[in-house]
Amino acid sequence: MDKKVIIIPTYNEKENIERIIRKVFSLEGGYSILVIDDGSPDGTALIVRELQKEFPERLFLIERAGKQGLGTAYLTGFKWSLEHGFDYIFEMDADFSHNPDDLQRLYSACADGGADLAIGSRYCDGVSVVNWPIGRIIMSYYASVYVRKTLGMKVYDCTAGFKCYSAKVLRTIDLDKVKMRGYGFQIEMKYTAYKLGFKIAEVPIIFVNRKEGTSKMSSGIFGEAFWGVLKLRFRKFDRKS
């Protein structure tokens, strides 16, 4: 059986973290979870440490000092996952905006459908977002349009954070050269995989806004992404030697 790990970055997710962990472990497929917590003052990491006693072979935790950014959390998780021999590495939020039941569909797109990267897409089949303010939907949707037009990448949900990578993608990308740290990181990783010739598949999902906890979005996140995309267009992409 393929080894599969889900990376979940956290900052103040005490309302969600135990429920999301138990939900994933209730699924078939033998998923492991790596939580990367950026010094949550609400005790998120303490909850995970307690759950590790119950799931010692499947639940892992990396604790970092302070908020270091979404991108650096995933890069840390990618390197850890490769070092530990996982075949498929997933990104997923802790707040149930991504439905854990869709994990199998992402995995199947890679393992059975031949994709190297599967994206849980909000926009490949219309707009599938629930409980977001209309302004945020418009901003997110047209951000992806902007990226698609600027970079010529045929991906409808360029900022999606629900993904499944085959390990060969992450082994090929030089992770030390990934520059963006906020949500622009999601764009950079997709575009890098695209430029290196990997097959990308979009799997339609329904994205539901969080019910518990606080969103980590900010205007600075979009600013980094906007200017970063322009720089991506002129960057050279090489496979890791």
Image (cartoon, helix red, strand yellow):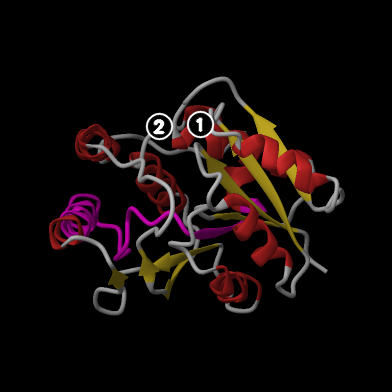
Give the number of marks. 2
Q: Which kind of residue does numbered mark 1 sit on?
A: Thr
**Side of 215 relative to 228 (left or right):** right
**Side of 72 relative to 87 (left or right):** left
Residues shaded magenta: 139-168
Mark drawn on residue 181: 2
Quarter location, residue 157: bottom left
Determine whether label 1 and label 2 are within 8 Å by CB: yes
Which residue is drawn at the image coordinates 61% and 76% (left, top)?
108
Q: Residues within 10 Å of mark 2 (few under 14, many from 20)?
A: many
Quarter location, residue 172: top right
**In the image, is residue 124 above or below residue 230?**
below
**In the image, is residue 162 above or below residue 45?**
below
Magenta-span inclusion, residue 147: yes
Which percent across, then down, holds residue 229? Answer: 25, 40
Which residue is drawn at the image coordinates 29% and 38% (left, top)?
232
| Nearer to me, 73 or 45 | 45
Mark 1: which secondary structure? helix
Which residue is drawn at the image coordinates 20% and 34% (left, top)?
227
**Side of 221 relative to 203 (left or right):** left
Magenta-span inclusion, residue 38: no
Question: In the rendered image, which quarter contains the C terminus?
Answer: top right
The residue labelled by disc 1 is 72
Which residue is drawn at the image coordinates 17% and 56% (left, top)?
149
Which percent across, then down, holds residue 189? Answer: 44, 45
**In the image, is residue 104 above or below residue 184?**
below
Mark 2: which secondary structure? loop
Q: Is residue 158 visible?
A: yes
